[in-house]
Image (cartoon, helix red, strand yellow):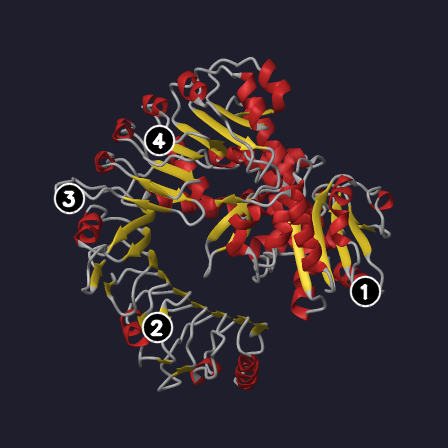
Amino acid sequence: MEITPEIVVGFDNEAKALINRLIRGSQLEIIPIVGMPGLGKTTLAKKVYNTLSSQRQFHIQLWCTVSQAYSVKDLLLQLLCSDGEHSRKNEELRNLDEEELLDKLRKKLLGNKYLVVFDDVWDDRVWNDLRLSFQGATKGSKILLTSRNSNVASQIEYGGEPHNLRLLTDTLSWELLQKKVFGEKECPEGLVKIGKQIAKNCKGLPFSVVIISGILATKEYERWDEVAVYDTDECMNILELSYTHLPPYLKPCLLYFGAFREDQEIQSKKLMQLWIAEGFVQCTDAKRLEHLAEEYMMDLIGRNLVMVAKHRSIGGVRACHIHDLLHKYCMVKAKEENFLQVLHGYDELSTFTEPPNLSRLSVWSKVEHFKESRLFCPQLSTLLFINLIRNDSESFLADASFVFQIYKGLRVLDIEQIVLRHKVFPSEVVSLVELRYLAMQGEMRVIPPSVAKLSNLETFRVISDYGIVSLPNTLWSMTKLRHLHIEGYDLVWSLPRENLENNSGLLNLDTFSTLRVSLDQRVENILKNIPNVRQLKIKLSKAKKSTTIGYCNMSGLESLESLEVWATSLPPDRVEFSFPSTLKKLVLIGLNLPWSKISLIEELPNLEVLKLLYHSFKGERWVLTEGGFRKLRFLDLENLDVVEWTDTDPDDHFPRLQKLLMSGLSKLELMPSCLAQISALELIEFRSCKASVKDLVQKIEEEQKDCGNEDLRIIP
């Protein structure tokens, strides 16, 4: 796994010194990067991690974020999944206990030279909790940790000399500020003097420089003097300045980060749906609310307040987070403005006295403490529950009725980190008629018709521990529904078999996942009822007693941009598709289609991301069609039985391809010659492929270099 890099200056010598320590010596050593908040400890660790990854100095590299409040199980899951190998087995790992996970990590590391990074360590407890997994370390293995506490290393076995980060010089502060504000462009001559003064005022703290540059980037040049005279002796003053200069519509979006855990990576899609439900995103033109929310997100990122944790395949933000200093500021400011309050544990829950007009509450607690406190805040409009024991499969609320009975005015209710042991959807929920956002988890097997009473519901997120769950016909009357997300391990949802032709349809539905249907007339009826859907995940199965070819006509979904299609028990070549020209992303899994049918996909004029996974296509020979894939930028091929992947004209395929990922191509012997000539190609990654693939990729790399592409990265 590569960690998302950030713009840094002044770290080249620091990184070289750390890398030299990490690659020399045969003994296991724990090397701490220490320093005050805002110095860039995590940024430096990322730089070192990515450099060593590209140099392939270690067999295995793993990363986890610890923070002040952590669970051992969560750390183990982070480590086991951080290299990508177990990402598809995440749910399987969650069902293991700590002892089993410790043993799994030990076996993973045993016999391999590894680098493990523990980010944001507060004391030596984490090492004592996990040390059994690191017994019998292979020569040259190293552990890197970041901490505010210089004494951590001396308290830990194998602890080495701390690497103390120093403050930036005035020159480096100015260099960083220029890069953050102007990128590769030169600073205008008239701003150099005042710019240097602003950089100097940041007192060498990189975080302060970054925050200040976010303010400057949005100000007219003649108003830079307003920032120059501001008292920046304290970092919190800089954060206050940044908050003050935000436009009013962005302030609540930023403060909302205070509701989540420190260092938590937040799924951007979920966060933006919460913003919309809260009423922070107001559309004044023809833009979708989701598009406007994404603009808000990118604005906060552009101001250096929000950091990208994970990118999407071809750009865009999959997950985000904020610096821990900014997180602290958001919590304090949100409480001060009576915008949001956070309660930790049973003591705070049981003694909490609700201030007048408190509208939002985030509860960070063990489940049993939340249950026992019977917290009474009848005026709440938002209740978010953050389980402090992350990934704790044993957490549950036997009876959640008090939640639904007390908080009658809720617009937002997120309790998906509580496992509700309700076999039936809790009937009390439907009395919360003001709900815009509902997220929950449990074993509910049927969603009752009465759910339609939630007529204001915009986002409905459910994690099911059961599997197949039935949705009622009354769902189609919930006209305000924008996002229907059903998640879970091997989860599918079945809509009722009744005829859907007479339904008015979900005209506002933007995203729908995961819909399970058989290839019969109902598919067409359902798709007609979601005409404006933009993102869709669908799981297909063969219609019972049907021997004919099934049709899945999606050409009428003229707003559809992202589509994922799974198939179960479909015989080869028994399904026909029709896709809309608007598609930008397509993921196909298990369809067993012949390669002759891929021409339908190659012709899609706007397709940028294509993932062909797990026998989506069958056959030994794939010949690229001339003029196909004109806009494709990202191609992922996994577990296919193709032997010959070839082209007819090397100048007429994949002109914009940037990233090629291949995994589990155990028979591949030939790759298209066009790959050696694509000037846009940035990355080829291959795993668990036939040995000959390495030689094929090496040849492509050599030919790319001959054509002048020195930046192509190869990751085996």
**Alpha carbons under labels 4 and 3: distance apart:** 28 Å
Q: Is residue 622 above or below residue 291?
A: below
Give the amino acid at mark 2: Phe
- Cα gap from disc 3 to disc 1, whole angstroms: 66 Å
Residue type at tag 3: Asn
Residue at the spot of label 4: 436
Residue at figure coordinates x 16%, y 43% from the top left: 500
Q: Is residue 306 left or right of residue 32?
A: left
| Mark found first going from the N terminus, 4 or 2 | 4
Front residue (pair 210, 161): 161
Question: Mark 2 vs mark 3: which is more N-terminal?
Answer: 3
Mark 2, other Cα within 10 Å: few <14 / some 14–19 / many ≥20: many
Q: Along the line of sight, which residue is nearer the eye, 384 or 289? A: 384
Asked if the residue at tag 3 contacts the one at tag 4, i.e. Cβ–Cβ closer than 8 Å, the answer is no
Gap between marks 1 and 2 measured at Cα: 47 Å
The three-letter code of the residue at mark 4 reads Arg
Distance Cα–Cα, label 4 vs label 2: 40 Å
Three-letter amino acid code at the position of disc 1: Lys
Residue pointed to by mark 3: 499
Q: Residue furthest front?
A: 545
Among the two numbered marks 1 and 4 on one chain, the one whose residue lies closer to the N terminus: 1
Q: Which residue is mark 1?
A: 139
- Sequence-first tag of 1 and 2: 1
Identify the residue under disc 2: 629
Q: Earlier in the sequence, mark 4 or mark 3?
A: 4
Mark 1 touches mark 2? (CB < 8 Å): no
Residue 564's quadrant in the figure? bottom left
Q: Secondary structure at mark 2?
A: loop
Q: Position of residue 553 (x, y in %)?
A: 21, 59
